[in-house]
Amino acid sequence: MNFKELCEARYSCRAYQDKPIEAEKIEYIKECVRLAPSAVNRQPWRFLFITDPEQLAVVKACYKRDWIQQAPAIVMCLKNESECWTRRYDNHSHADIDIAIATEHLCLAATEQGLGNCWVCNFDIDMLRTTFPIPEGYDPAVLIPLGYAADEKPEKVRKPMEEIFF
C-alpha cells in the first residue's frame, strides 16, 4: 500500500484476537522504529516489547480498561530528557517530539504488517515505575498495545483541509 493508504488504514484498535504476533513481524517493526529520526540524532528513547504473560499483566494493571487485557503484546515507549536535544533559545526539550515520531513509526509499521495498535497515554505512571524495571533516566511516555484486530475499523473523522492548512 502507498503511504496515504497506510495512513488511512491505521486506527485506534481496541479489540484484539487471541493470536500471538510472529517474531519476524516484531523484528520488522523494531527496525522501522530504529530508523526514526530525532532532533540532532540523539535518539533519546528505549522501547520494551512485552509479550511475556506475567510482564504483560503488570503493565496492563496500570491502565484500567478491559479492552487492553486482550492485547498479546504491549510496547512501552520510554523517553530520556537528559539525552534529548534542547533548544537553546528557550530550553525547550524535544524528548516528547522525538518519542512521538518513533512511536508513530512503530504504529505505521505495525499497521503495514496487519496489526492493530492504539496510543495509550493515560496510564498510572507511578504504579508502572514501582512494578516494572524501567531503566534509570527513562520515563514511560506511551504504551502501544499490539495484536491482530478483532474489531472493525471505524470511519476516520478529520477536520477539513481548510480548517488545518492556511
Image (cartoon, rainbow, N blue to C red):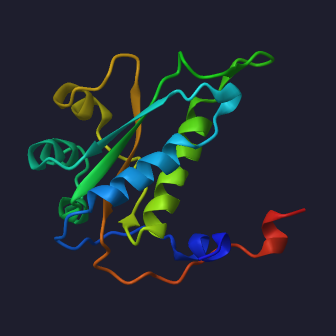
Q: Can the viewer see residue 3 in this picture?
A: yes
Residue shown at 52%/76% (left/top)?
Answer: 9
Where residue 77 sits: x, y (%)?
Answer: 41, 40
Residue shown at 79%/64% (left/top)?
Answer: 164
Residue shown at 80%/69% (left/top)?
Answer: 163
The quarter in which the C terminus is drawn is bottom right
Where residue 135 sits: x, y (%)?
Answer: 32, 22
Left or right of 103? Residue 51 is left
* Between 130 and 75, the one nearer to me in the picture: 75
Q: Can the viewer see residue 145 in this picture?
A: no
Residue shown at 76%/19% (left/top)?
Answer: 90
Determine the residue located farthest toward the left in the rendered image.
54
Q: Is residue 109 above or below residue 134?
A: below
Q: Is residue 24 above or below residue 88?
A: below
* Between 21 and 8, the one nearer to me in the picture: 21
The quarter in which the N terminus is drawn is bottom right
Where residue 104 sits: x, y (%)?
Answer: 54, 53
Determine the residue located farthest toward the front in the rendered image.
24
